[in-house]
Amino acid sequence: MAFVPQLLFFLVLAFAAFIIRSRVLRIRDNIRLGKANPVNDRSGERWNNVLLVAFGQKKMFKKMIPATLHFFIYAGFLIINLEVLEFVIDGLAGTHRIFAPYLGSMYNLLMNFFEFLALAVLLACVVFLIRRNVIKVPRFRSPELTGWPLLDANLILITEIVLMSAIFTMNACDQLLQVHSEHYTATGTLFFSSFLMPLFSNLSQDALHVIERSAWWFHILGILGFAVYVTYSKHLHIFMAFVNTYYARLEPKGQINNMPVVTREVKSMLGIAPADAAPAGEPGRFGAKDINDLTWNQLAAAYSCTECGRCTAECPANLTGKKLSPRKIMMDVRDRMEEVGNSIAKGGKGLQDGKFLLDTYISREEINACTSCNACVEACPVLINPLDIILEMRRYVSMEESGAPAQWNGMFQNIETSFAPWKFPPSDRFKWANE
Ligand code: SF4
Ligand code: SF4
């Protein structure tokens, strides 16, 4: 029966891996609901963005205090996972601290470093909880951050605190047990958890063993639960930020994406021969009404959104009381993807459910409030571009429905007939230079 814990551990690990795999495939399929847009250019600049912006968190450091705290949580997440590797091997092999004999005194150094990170993560999470719930930082109190998004953010912070506490409990009991049992490999003093040892020093060996094992199981089950939960939560940005920074737009921010089919038309109106052949078939829908009109990159960006609200905090439309919040735009795109993806998975109507991203999720009042200033793009720490999506929806309203605000129609007509926003014939264009 000695193998029962190992078998149990294997089953739990396999179950978690199965759910994570299914969820990753679902997210991939949801992103593929959009239009394919292969990105094969400027790989050096793209990797640079991954290293500096995603890995180095460069844009986060515009706000030093939250950036430093976030960095502790991020580094803790990455580095403490090395310890999880030992947990997994121990769990499967029935060993205890399998790396200790191989690493010698390095093991003590590493464990102390992990404890330092665990303490930093714990304190950072406490500060973040206070900022959200006690100080109530304005960008965390927007209407789109009530209900599940607020609970999601709090849940993950509380889970991190509990998981880090389990590490300290486990290490404190472990150090007490090392004195009496050969099974408990000597680790040397573990500085931070040794402060907890007096709490457990009067307990019997059996009680210490139960607490140490419970903390071990609690921690590893928590980590596996966390890994599953992340795929359903905004914390997916831990992984997707790397994807998004690679595929982010590299053109200057003010440069708007042209539509090749429209460019050809305009060029032929101006008597310029188009450089490439006309694309075959129907041009498809102009702009975006639903998620399938957006590109893979734009949909993947929605899964990268951290819901930090830095974009909304800088948005002039939002700051002047308009309904627009760029963070909500990204959250709506993600929610619509999830809705359609779940419906397809259940054999439902999918995209034909009578709902659309525009109007069902995002109102015309929101997209018309955008000044196209790019402040949200500049503010985003993971290079998301909410403006691109807003412009695509406006494009749909203008070009497919002729539904742009009436004041814009004169300008559209001038562009069509005079090739400029003003009502002068092209032949008069250089008259200003005559004198
Ligand atoms: S581009 Fe639009 S959404 Fe972004 S900050 Fe400016 S007004 Fe707000
Ligand atoms: S779009 Fe960027 S800035 Fe806005 S909430 Fe998401 S991650 Fe934060």
Image (spheres, rainbow, N blue to C red):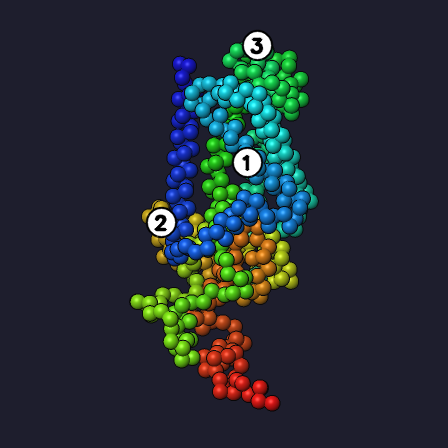
Q: Residue at x 52, y 57 (%)?
A: 385
The front one of 406 and 170 is: 170
Residue 10 in sight from this viewpoint? yes
Residue most extreme to the right: 135
Residue 358 is situated, as x and y percent measured from the top left of the image, at 46, 61
Q: How far apart in space, not on screen, are marks 2 and 1 (Cα)?
A: 34 Å
**Circle 3: is it few (<14), some (14-19), or many (20+) Cα within 10 Å?**
few
Horizontal and vertical percent position of residue 326 = 55, 57
**Sequence-wise, which precedes: disc 3 or disc 2?**
3
Q: Which residue is mark 2?
A: 344
Q: Position of residue 426 (x, y in %)?
A: 49, 84
Asked if 252 appears above or below 201 in the picture, the reply is below
Q: Secondary structure at mark 2?
A: helix
Q: Amino acid at mark 2?
A: Ile
Residue beneath disc 1? 77
Q: Residue at x 52, y 28 (%)?
A: 83
Asked whether residue 363 is in view, the answer is no
Front disc: 2 or 1: 1
Q: Residue at x 40, y 36 (%)?
A: 19
Residue at the image position 39 percent from the left and 22 percent from the top: 7
Residue of label 3: 180
Please, what secondary structure does the residue beneath circle 1 have?
A: helix
Distance from the alpha carbon under mark 3 to that under mark 2: 58 Å
Please report whichever mark, 2 or 1, sits nearer to the chain's N-terminal start: 1
Measured Cα–Cα span from mark 1 to mark 3: 33 Å
Q: Is mark 3 within 8 Å of ligand 2?
A: no
| Quadrant of residue 293 within the rendered picture | bottom left
